[in-house]
Image (cartoon, grey):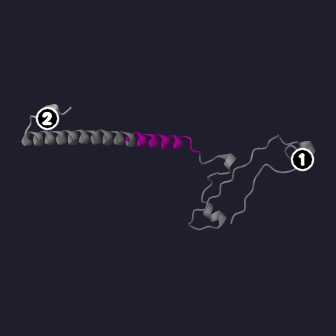
Amino acid sequence: MGDCLEDLNFDQLHCLEQDMENAVQFIRQRKYKVIATQIDTKKKKVRNEREIHRGLLQEFDLPKEEPQYGLVDDGEYHHVLGYDNSSHVLALRLQPCPLPPNLHAGGAAGTGSGSCVTTYTLL
């Protein structure tokens, strides 16, 4: 390897070196362009997937009146709770009763004591 280079003079070797450097630079630029294109494509895919995800979240979002969460849109809550012009919303999720209420044993579910409603104190 390199036997054919023995007959070349300094100027020819210098031109060969320049050609090789230009080829390496061209290949490097092409490689960076391909990588940049792939990155842009991946970013577009991620952005599209986020939009799809956001749309699905909005599609499956809970409606304003959902009885199991205790939220009913009856108007302005800040007047009822004593807050004026502030946004304090309290959402309660009612725990499902494991058994239907036994009305013959005190009216509570299952054992005859306890409640299916979880309550929280407003701070």
**84 versus 42 height, above or below:** below
Where residue 82 sits: x, y (%)? 65, 67
Q: Residues within 10 Å of mark 1 (few under 14, many from 20)?
A: some
Q: Residue at coordinates 14% horizontally, 42% vertically from top-left?
A: 18
Q: Residues within 10 Å of mark 2 (few under 14, many from 20)?
A: few
Q: Is residue 93 magenta?
A: no
Q: Nearer the viewer, mark 2 or mark 1?
A: 2
Q: Which mark is residue 99?
A: none
Where residue 51 sits: x, y (%)? 45, 43
Residue placed under numbered mark 1 in the picture: 112
Marks 2/1: CA distance?
100 Å
Q: Secondary structure at mark 1?
A: loop
Q: Residue at coordinates 19% horizontally, 38% vertically from top-left?
A: 23
Q: Quadrant of residue 103?
A: top right
**35 versus 70 height, above or below:** above
Q: Residue at coordinates 57% horizontally, 44% vertically from top-left?
A: 61
Residue placed under numbered mark 2 in the picture: 5
Residue range of the region highlighted in magenta in the rendering: 44-62
Where residue 39 sits: x, y (%)? 36, 42
Front-lying residue, 120 or 3: 3
Q: Is residue 39 left or right of residue 8?
A: right
Front-lying residue, 32 or 47: 32
Q: Residue flagged by tag 2: what amino acid is it?
A: Leu
Front-lying residue, 101 or 78: 101
Q: Quadrant of residue 31?
A: top left
Quadrant (top left, top right, bottom left, bottom right) of the N terminus: top left
Total of numbered circles in the picture?
2
